[in-house]
């Protein structure tokens, strides 16, 4: 297996503060990987070390097998770490042109990328007039317009409204699927992480406390919740795949593509279906439980 980012025994101290504490983490290439944790957990420090922006106190970090900060790996990486900043006198179009020249990129579709992130109408406005959300969108265009194989995003939807968050979520998934890019992102918006990420790692006080597929960490797979009657008939048809959820509902542990056939079978058997809704994995509850379980160990 190839890895997009590797950290081995990574420690970073700032005086008495340990931003990273003997962190070992391997993020596989491909898909979308989330790095979660409260403020001060070490997420941004990990990204800064991986990009060669700061040096670790001890341990090593690698991008695609090359040492952190190495030119050969950085040419294939796009990154947006914390809130992006731009020369206030440049427009969005001029900003991307400047970045293309600096990176040596050729034949960059600047107009196309401004359109993809929803900034076509503001392409010739100075960035000093941009809202926080608009600056985030421009930052995403700057990350992806050179077609990197790895993108590192720190709070990519910060300052955006719900519609903007949904657009960026869909863009991230599409880029991972269509462009083959590995995307590593940090976010406090756990519902968005659940929707966009394949795997996640949870950091606390510079340490790795959990890592794995979103559904595994959440403690359950998505299930189809059916409010139907008679419940006994639904349970009988589902067998081991069904479980009662209160007096009038059943949880069906099935894959999404199986749902239409199940509903047709239930209706054909004379079952009345009043509601059918997917119950998603509850990442937020799992995240809080993991952090709370970590606290007593740290106190000792």
Image (cartoon, rainbow, N blue to C red):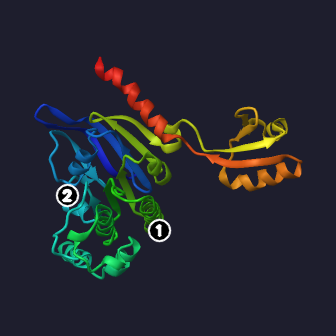
Quadrant of res 102: bottom left
Which element is circle 1 on?
A: helix
Seen in the picture, residue 164 relative to 208 is either above or below; the reply is below
Q: Height in image: 34 above or below 10?
A: below
Q: Determine the image quadrant of residue 7.
A: top left
Q: Is residue 190 left or right of residue 119?
A: right
Quick check: can you spot residue 109?
Answer: no
Q: CA distance from mark 2 to mark 1?
A: 27 Å
Residue 38: % across, % down: 32, 39
Q: Is residue 104 above or below residue 69?
A: below
Q: Could you tell me which residue is drawn at 83 percent across and 35 percent down? A: 232
Number of marks present in the image shown: 2
N-terminal-most mark, 2 or 1: 2
Q: Please report the residue visible at 40 percent of the width from the left and 63 percent of the height from the top.
A: 181
**Tag 1 residue:** 178
Which class describes the residues within 10 Å of circle 1: few (<14), some (14-19), or many (20+)? few
Q: Are marks 2 and 1 in contact (CB under 8 Å)?
A: no
In the image, farthest residue toward the left: 15
256 lies left or right of 69: right
The percent position of residue 50, horizontal first and vertical second, equals 24, 51
Picture coordinates of residue 59 (x, y %)?
A: 21, 39
Q: Quadrant of the C terminus?
A: top left
| Mark 2, residue position | 70
Q: Is 91 on the left or on the right of 186, as rendered? A: left
Residue 184 seen anywhere in this rendered image of the structure: yes
Give the camera-side residue of 13 and 52: 13
């Amino acid at each position: 297996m190839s890895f997009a980012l590797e950290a081995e025994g990574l420690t970073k101290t700032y005086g008495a503060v340990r931003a990273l504490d003997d962190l070992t983490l391997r993020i596989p290439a491909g898909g979308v990987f989330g790095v979660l944790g409260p403020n001060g957990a070490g997420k941004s420090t990990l990204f800064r070390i991986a990009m060669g922006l700061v040096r670790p106190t001890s341990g090593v970090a690698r991008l695609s097998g090359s040492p952190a900060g190495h030119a050969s790996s950085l040419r294939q990486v796009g990154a947006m770490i914390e809130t992006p900043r731009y020369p206030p006198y440049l427009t969005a179009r001029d900003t991307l042109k400047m970045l293309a020249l600096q990176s040596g990129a050729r034949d960059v579709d600047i107009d196309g990328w401004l359109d993809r992130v929803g900034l076509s109408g503001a392409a010739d406005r100075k960035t000093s007039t941009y809202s926080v959300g608009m600056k985030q969108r421009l930052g995403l265009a700057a990350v992806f317009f050179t077609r990197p194989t790895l993108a590192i995003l720190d709070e990519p939807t910060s300052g955006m409204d719900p519609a903007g968050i949904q657009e960026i979520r869909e863009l991230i998934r599409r880029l991972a699927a269509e462009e083959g890019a590995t995307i590593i992102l940090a976010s406090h918006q756990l519902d968005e992480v659940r929707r966009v990420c394949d795997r996640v790692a949870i950091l606390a006080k510079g340490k790795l406390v959990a890592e794995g597929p979103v559904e595994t960490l959440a403690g359950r797979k998505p299930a189809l919740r059916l409010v139907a009657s008679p419940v006994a008939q639904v349970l009988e048809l589902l067998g081991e795949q069904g479980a009662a959820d209160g007096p009038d509902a059943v949880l069906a542990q099935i894959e999404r593509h199986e749902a239409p056939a199940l509903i047709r079978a239930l209706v054909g058997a004379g079952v009345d279906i009043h509601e059918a809704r997917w119950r998603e994995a509850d990442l937020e509850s799992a995240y809080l439980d993991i952090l709370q379980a970590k606290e007593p160990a740290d106190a000792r």
